[in-house]
Amino acid sequence: MPFRLTTLLLLPLAAGAASAQISTDRPGFGSSPTLVDAGVFQVEVGAPEATLNGEADTYSAPVALRYGATSALEVRLSTSAFDAADQDGAAFDPEVGFRTITAGVKVAVPTRSFEVAIIPELTVPTEGDDGLTFQLDVPVGVPLGDVGLTLVPGVTTGNGSTQLNAVASLSRSFGGPLSGYAEVGAFPFLDGGGDTPVSGGAGLTVLLSDDVQVDAFFDAGLTDAADDLVVGVGLSFRLD
């Protein structure tokens, strides 16, 4: 699925308030409306993630750095520390480095009933001929008793195309440190750029402590335009 590394990452899966325990934007392809607490530095790493399409598979290690500048503003920086392609008839081509760098902010929007944030981000390529990519997501958290619903409308534009992002996810704590989620996302092109990629998936997170979380997930393509399968594991931790 295009633009996966430029943001599309999911809701807070750790139960409880953000100040009590870590709340992450991974795994998954949506974003949480929850900000990192003011003065807190948070690291989220995929180690690794694999996109499997039969004859053309790719592997990556996405890294997101998040810092709570204030209670209403978070500064964000993300990239991939490792990329590799495995195509039939071609040599396996691993590359350590940062092919793109994505910078942005997450701004809390005051509301009475829901948790809402605005996330503008700009992706800058460090090599190749690709241009800048801009993405704007507006995650909305809706409490539904023991289940949390997160809706993430957005738009991504750059390199001659514009694509809508429409993600919905449900999350639930299973008691203790274990939580899980299910998600579906559609990413239609506004300018006739091709068929609409649609994917669905699920994942689990485990709190090792209030400041450390591990996760595992999968996303499966529901249309021919989407990646066949994306799988991965990750680690997130925060530093006060």
Image (spheres, rainbow, N blue to C red):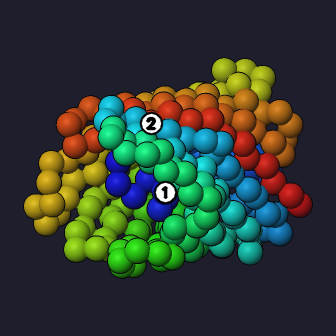
Is residue 12 at all visible to an observer of this figure? no
Quarter holding the C terminus is bottom right
Three-letter code, disc 1:
Leu
Instruction: Please tell me which residue lies in front, 78 or 17.
Output: 78
* Camera-nearest residue between 112 and 206: 206
User: Horizontal and vertical percent for residue 59?
Assistant: 51, 44
Q: Quadrant of residue 230?
A: top left
> Residue shown at 74%/74% (left/top)?
70
Q: Quadrant of residue 163?
A: bottom left
Please give the label number shown on residue 230. 2
Mark sitting earlier along the chain (1/2) = 1
Q: CA distance from mark 1 to mark 2?
A: 12 Å
Q: Residue furthest left?
A: 192
Callout 1: helix, strand or loop?
helix
Q: In the rendered image, is residue 224 in sight?
A: yes
The one of 226 and 213 positioned closer to us in this rendering? 226
Q: Residue furthest right?
A: 240
Dot 1 surroundings within 10 Å: few (below 14), some, or many (20 or more)? many
Residue 49: give x, y in percent of width and height.
55, 41
Q: Which mark is residue 5?
A: 1
Viewer-closest of 47 and 216: 47
| Image mark for residue 122 | none
Q: Amino acid at mark 2?
A: Val
**Mark 2 surroundings within 10 Å by alpha-carbon count, few (fewer than 14), some (14 through 19), many (20 or more):** many
Q: Are marks 1 and 2 in contact (CB under 8 Å)?
A: no
Residue drawn at x 83%, y 69% is 39
In the displayed structure, 82 sits above or below 16; it is below
SS label for mark 2 = strand
Q: Is residue 199 left or right of residue 8?
A: left
**Residue placed at 54% from the left, 51% from the top?**
94
